[in-house]
Amino acid sequence: MINEQQSKRNFIKLSGGMLTGTLIATSGLFSLMAPSRSWSLSLTTLPNNVAEAILMATRHIFPHKNLENAVYALVVKDLDSAATNDPAVKKLLVDGVDTLNQKAKGEWLSAKPQDQNKIILSMVDSDFFEKIRGTSIVSLYNNDMAWAHFGYEGASFEQGGYLNRGFQDLDWLPEPPKNVSPAK
C-alpha cells in the first residue's frame, strides 16, 4: 500500500516505471489496482461522485490516451485538499458537477464520451472549468509519474546538464542543413 508519506518517485521505482491500473471508486476512496500492487487515494472532503466526475472532466480537458488514471487522480487529490482548506472551493466543485449532471439530463458520468466532452467544453468559461484546468496544469504535468509516461527524464542540472546527456539525440526531427550548423 503506497501512502502519502512515500514519494511518487518511490512508487515509480516500485512499479518499474510502468503505471498500470484502473480507477475504481469505493467508500470514500479511489483505489487504483495494479497487477501486483494496490494503493489508494483518500478523499477528505469531496464526495466520491464529485471526485469521479472531476477525474473524468480532467481527462476531457487534458486528453492523453494512454496516461493512467493514477496520474489524473493527483489532480483530484489536490482539488480535494483545496476544498478541505476552503469551503468556497468545495461549493464550486460540487456545484460544477451538479451543472454537468443537469446539462447531461441525468448523470454526466453515464453520458457517452462525446456528449461528456461537449458538455465540459460548454463550461469552458466557468470558474469550475478554470479551477480544474488551473490545478491540472501543475498537478498533472509536474510529477514523476507523468514524466515517466511522457519520457521526460526530469531536471538535468543535478546531472551536469543536457549537453552530454541527450542534447543531440533528437531522432524525430530531420537533420538541419550543414550551412546552418556551427563549425566544430
Image: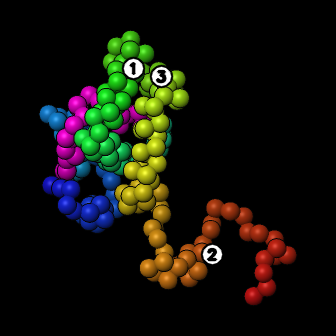
Residue 168 — which label?
2
Between disc 2 and disc 1, the foreground one is 1
**Rendered residue at 24%/41% (across/down):** 84
Residue highlighted by disc 1: 99
x, y (%) of residue 7? Answer: 26, 63
x, y (%) of residue 79? Answer: 33, 42
Would you say 178 lies left or right of 102 here? right
Q: Earlier in the sequence, mark 2 or mark 1?
A: 1
Would you say 145 lies left or right of 150 here? left
Residue highlighted by disc 3: 119
Please name the amino acid that badge 3 sits on: Ile
Name the image quarter holding the C terminus: bottom right
> Can residue 103 be seen from the camera position used here?
yes
Q: Secondary structure at mark 2?
A: loop
Q: Look at the image and say whether residue 50 sits in the magenta stretch.
A: yes
Calculate the distance from the C-alpha at mark 3 to the C-alpha at mark 2. 44 Å
**Rendered residue at 36%/45% (across/down):** 75
Would you say 148 lies left or right of 174 here? left
**Rendered residue at 24%/34% (across/down):** 46
- Please determine whether, in this image, residue 117 is positioned above or below residue 7: above
Could you say which is closer to the camera, residue 117 or residue 4? 4
Q: Look at the image and say whether residue 77 sits in the magenta stretch.
A: no
Calculate the distance from the C-alpha at mark 3 to the C-alpha at mark 1. 9 Å
Q: Residues within 10 Å of mark 3 (few under 14, many from 20)?
A: many
x, y (%) of residue 97? Answer: 35, 25
Segment tinted magenta in the rendering? 38-60
Between disc 3 and disc 2, the foreground one is 3
Rendered image quadrant of residue 32: top left
